[in-house]
Amino acid sequence: MMFDCCLPLTGIATSGVVLSTIREASDKDYVLTVLSDCCADGDEEVHQILTTKVFQMQAEVISLKQWIS
């Protein structure tokens, strides 16, 4: 039997750990949610581009408040 696994993602390296995890987990067919306000990066512009454009191709990108409700 196949089922989808949901994986919420947060982290302090949006362009490192979060990006790498999205790529790997997406390849393994996880259903992904990025909690955008629970992620950060040393370069705010990179963080914004990843969360508003790149991540949305493989994950749902929402705030923590949206995820809790």
Image (cartoon, grey):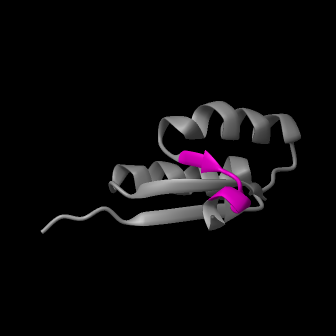
Quadrant location of the N terminus?
bottom left
The one of 63 and 56 positioned closer to us in this rendering: 63
Q: Is residue 53 magenta?
A: no
- Seen as rendered, the residue at the extreme left is 1
Whether residue 4 is situated above or below residue 48 in the rendered picture: below
Whether residue 33 is situated above or below residue 61 in the rendered picture: below
Q: Is residue 28 left or right of residue 2?
A: right
Rendering quarter of residue 39:
bottom right
Q: Is residue 26 left or right of residue 13?
A: left
Q: Is residue 52 left or right of residue 9?
A: right
Q: Is residue 38 left or right of residue 9?
A: right
Quadrant location of the C terminus?
bottom right
Rendering quarter of residue 31:
bottom left
**Which range of residues does the magenta coloring cover?**
60-66
Residue 49, percent across and down?
Answer: 72, 32
The mark total stands at 0
- Seen as rendered, the residue at the extreme front is 69
Kindly identify the residue that appears in the image at 43 percent across and 64 percent down: 6
Q: Is residue 64 magenta?
A: yes
Residue 58, percent across and down?
Answer: 47, 42
Whether residue 39 is situated above or below residue 48 in the rendered picture: below
Kindly identify the residue that appears in the image at 31 percent across and 62 percent down: 4
Whether residue 23 is situated above or below residue 67 in the rendered picture: above
Rendering quarter of residue 24:
bottom left
The one of 4 and 29 positioned closer to us in this rendering: 4
Residue 41, percent across and down?
Answer: 81, 50
Kindly identify the residue that appears in the image at 68 percent across and 38 percent down: 50
Residue 21, percent across and down?
Answer: 53, 57
Kindly identify the residue that appears in the image at 18 percent across and 64 percent down: 2
